[in-house]
Image (cartoon, rainbow, N blue to C red):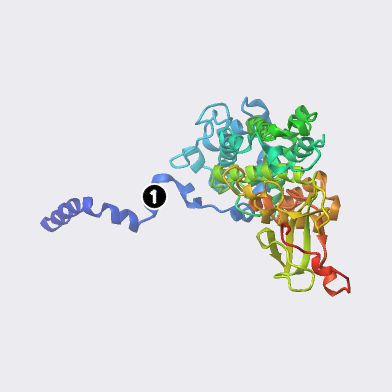
Amino acid sequence: MWYTLFLLTSSALLLPCLSVPLIATFPHWHQKRCGPVSGFYGQQQSDWDANNMDAWLNAWWNNHTSEISSNSRGFAGAFGQWALGNPDWSCRDDGSSSSCDFDPCDNRVLNDKGNDLRQAYYVAESVNRLHSYFVGLSQAFQVASIAAALSKDSWATTFYRDKDVKSVTVLREVLNAITTVIGIGTAFGGLAGPVAGAASSAVGALFTGAAAVATPLIGQHQDDTFEKSADLGGILGTIVLEAMKGYVAANNLLMHGDDFEGTGDIRSYLKGGLFLNFPGVDKVALIDAMNAFLVGQAVNQLYRTQKIFIMGGGACGDGQGIGSGPQESSVCRDGKAWYLYYWQENDVVSTTSHQWGWVATPPGAEQLGGPNYPGVTIQDIINSSLDSYNVARYSYNTDTAKSRAQNALTDGWENPGSKGASWEGVFTIPVCDVGWATGADLQGKEFILQPYGHE
């Protein structure tokens, strides 16, 4: 008896000291406190397909159509009631910070789902993270940084130096590309790289839906011409900010169980587990990427109205008898050297070898990558233009850009947003491949490539 009492007393005295190691030694204590759902924590995107989640969600949807249609909050409300015991789970973007909150720990309704527990948890987690994605996108583009980065009063004077100020629709051409840029930014949204498998179709839906949101906004500025290009950045910033407000509507439609811009209902966006372990929108990276795309598009259109071109195709380092280009404005790629040129016309009477002009640095190129125009470099211009040329030669247009971006996202071979301004189609500067001249017998071929300037 005394021995038993001693053991009980000693154990009671030791419990405060042993409580931490005891919990660490017996992990099932956490499961008892949190419920069996804790066994499914640490989920990965691959877990979605491994558990046939698309089919499970379709079956659940078909078996609960009446609950979805009768619930004022639609799908989110019906699923919240069924899986979480929360009829107010709307996941709407309506100013509330708790409309999509859920705590799986100690949630009796969720933990009593038995064979459906894992699936219920995966869907609830994905819906919650999809909601945070849309909210993050809206917040990212409500900040002033994008407008500040684009709202310059010297676009035309910085990147345009032609003798004749042409009345060309530069701004209109830039705007035609904005729907693709917004779609790319939306799909990027913090996703680190290309997405393969079923989830790539969800990324494709993000792109298509975003482009559809932006389209009607573009028409409001389609009468703008070159004379207004000084306000190019301000107009671009306004369009992007307005477009991003559409994500509030997108979130609310999808959470209700409705179709969004012909891309399908929320199941299209959850497909393949795209949002099962989504870490959240990297707002800084997203804003930087969008700024680079928009600055690149604007500079590209201004450059395309001038005598600016890319020439090369010989070996890196030159030395093949066709001259030597400006190394400060070059790219060595696949063993070939490429150079960015601007033909500076001579506007004075001259009888020298440069009487008609000479090659020079493109207007404003020295400011690219600096504080006023960050995220875009001369190397981006060359690489993007080369990729555009390799895809469609001189016929790469806004339709090509949209198709290629959507194909890259849907087929999962690239996430354009991660490439920044070097992505194909951001720049479409004409390319002249003179590599063939290295083996040709041409008089004066040593002057084909030249450094900038003249004597």
Please identify the quarter of the rendering in which residue 298 is found.
top right
Say which amino acid is labelled 1: His
Residue 164 locus on image (x, y percent): 81, 39
Q: Is residue 31 left or right of residue 46?
A: left
Mark 1 neighbour class, 10 Å CA radius: few under 14, some 14 to 19, many 20 or more = some
From the top left corner, tell me how far across and down residue 397 is, in percent: 82, 46
Question: In this picture, is 23 found above or below 231?
Answer: below
Q: Which residue is drawn at 49% across and 50% down?
A: 41
Residue at 67% x, 46% y is 364
* Side of 312 relative to 235 (left or right): right
The quadrant holding residue 321 is bottom right
* Residue ID for mark 1: 30
Q: Which quadrant holds the N terminus?
A: bottom left
Which is nearer the eye, 283 or 435? 435
* Image height of 222 relative to 393, above or below: above
- Image coordinates of residue 21 in percent, x first then y, are 29, 56
Number of disc labels: 1
Q: Is mark 1 on a helix, strand or loop?
A: helix
In the depicted structure, whether residue 314 falls above or below residue 39: below
Q: Quadrant of the C terminus?
A: bottom right
Q: Quick one: which residue is furthest to the left in this view?
A: 2
Can you see residue 62?
no
Residue 303 place in picture, x, y as percent: 76, 46
Position of residue 7 in the picture relative to residue 225 (left or right): left
The answer to whether residue 322 is visible is: yes
Q: Is 399 or 397 nearer to us in this picture? A: 397
